[in-house]
Amino acid sequence: MINCTFENGHKASLKHVVVDAIVINGDKILLIKRAPHLSNGGKWAIPGGFLDRDETCERAVLRELKEETGLSGKIVELFKIIDNPKRKNEDRQNVTFVYHIKASGKIKIDPKEISGAKWFDANNLPKQEDFAFDHFEIIESFLTSHA
């Protein structure tokens, strides 16, 4: 949560805005392994991160993809917005914009952000318990809706 004090002195805890990328290449999906020092460290996830000030969600998702994997991306669609206040394995209450992305380039990871990146066959993903947050469920929902 973000703790804020407004002009009138009122205090509030607000949600973070997060962007995530479902990156598909044929029948493969890109997953990143979160760096050990991050929450859910060592778990698989879809690329993503926090929205920066003065940034649109679309710019943020492409920036996060580039920062984490070295890949350039093109947005195909906004897949969904998740605002569930009780998300699985989440230590903060985030509102997430999940985009379907087409990517190009060669993977080059940033070890400050992730410890690995790998293309997985969409029908042969890691086990659900090996995923960070609710990313396994997000991927399942995407694959079901795009079958």
Image (cartoon, rainbow, N blue to C red):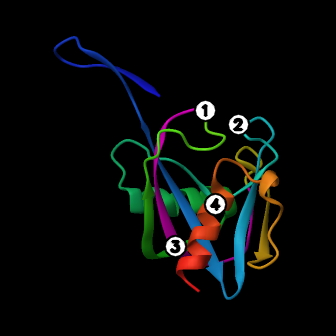
Q: Residue at x 68, y 60 (%)?
A: 136
Q: What residue sits right under mark 4 in the picture?
A: 137
Q: Which residue is mark 2?
A: 39
Residue 136 appears in the rendering: yes
Task: Estimate how packed mark 1 is, as few (under 14), some (14 to 19) or many (20 or more) residues with alpha carbons within 10 Å.
Answer: few
Looking at the rendered structure, the kind of residue marked 2 is: Ser
Q: Earlier in the sequence, mark 1 or mark 4?
A: 1
Residue 125 lies in magenta, yes or no? Answer: no
Viewer-side label of 1, 3: 1
Marks 2,3: beta carbons within 8 A: no
Image point (61%, 77%), residue name: 143
Tell me if 116 is positioned left or right of 47 in this view: right
Horizontal and vertical percent position of residue 61: 49, 60
User: Reading the chain from its start, which is encountered first: label 3 or label 4?
Assistant: 3
Judging depth in this view, the residue of 60 and 27 nearest the camera is 27
Q: Quick one: label 1 or label 2, which is nearer the N terminus? A: 2
> Is residue 5 depicted above or below 94 in this figure?
above
Task: List x then y, in percent, for residue 119.
Answer: 77, 74
Which quarter shows the C terminus?
Answer: bottom right
27 left or right, relative to 16: right
Residue at the location (71% across, 86% down)?
Answer: 27
Q: How far apart are the alpha carbons under marks 1 and 3?
A: 25 Å
Left-right relation of 121 to 147: right
